[in-house]
Image (cartoon, rainbow, N blue to C red):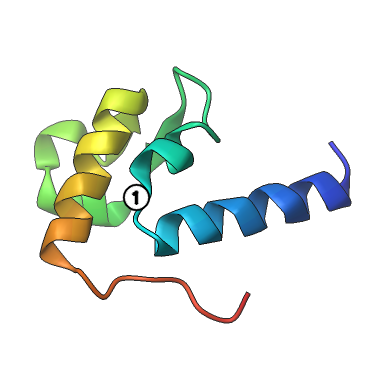
Amino acid sequence: MTPKNIEQITAEWVIAFNSKDIDRLLRLYHDNAKHYSPRIEKKKPETRGWLEGKAQFREWWEESFRNLPDLEYRGF
């Protein structure tokens, strides 16, 4: 993977996230992708902070976008 590829993927991710397009976001991940965040651990302690797989990612983003409708990334 080149820096240019990484920049393209990052730009696509930010656009998908800011538009709240979960299907578009999920297309950027492997089916078995894993993600850790202390925020996840705090909100869902049973996960120990880990999301695993697209179903869990979808659930997390749906809840996040519903509860934080103004959530977005800036400065990219």
The residue positioned farthest toward the bottom in the image shown: 75
Q: Secondary structure at mark 1?
A: loop
Give the image location of residue 59, x and y in percent.
20, 37
Amino acid beneath label 1: Ser
| Structural crowding at the residue carrying mark 1, measured as other residues with C-alpha within 10 Å and reported as few (<14), some (14–19) or many (≥20) | few
Q: In which quadrant of the rendered view does residue 47 lie?
A: top left
Question: Residue at the location (15% across, 50% down)?
Answer: 63
Q: In which quadrant of the rendered view does residue 42 lie?
A: bottom left
Question: In this orientation, which residue lies closer to the viewer: 3 or 70?
Answer: 70
Give the image location of residue 58, x and y in percent.
27, 36
Question: Residue at the location (65% across, 58% down)?
Answer: 11
In this view, 8 is above or below 33 = below
Residue that mark 1 sits on: 37
Which quarter of the figure is the C terminus placed in? bottom right
Give the image location of residue 8, x and y in percent.
74, 51
In this view, 59 is above or below 54 = below
Which quarter of the figure is the N terminus placed in? top right
Question: In this orientation, which residue lies closer to the viewer: 37 or 56?
Answer: 56
**In the image, 9: left or right of 19?**
right
Question: Residue at the location (46% across, 18% down)?
Answer: 31
Give the image location of residue 14, x and y in percent.
53, 60
**In the image, 2: left or right of 30?**
right
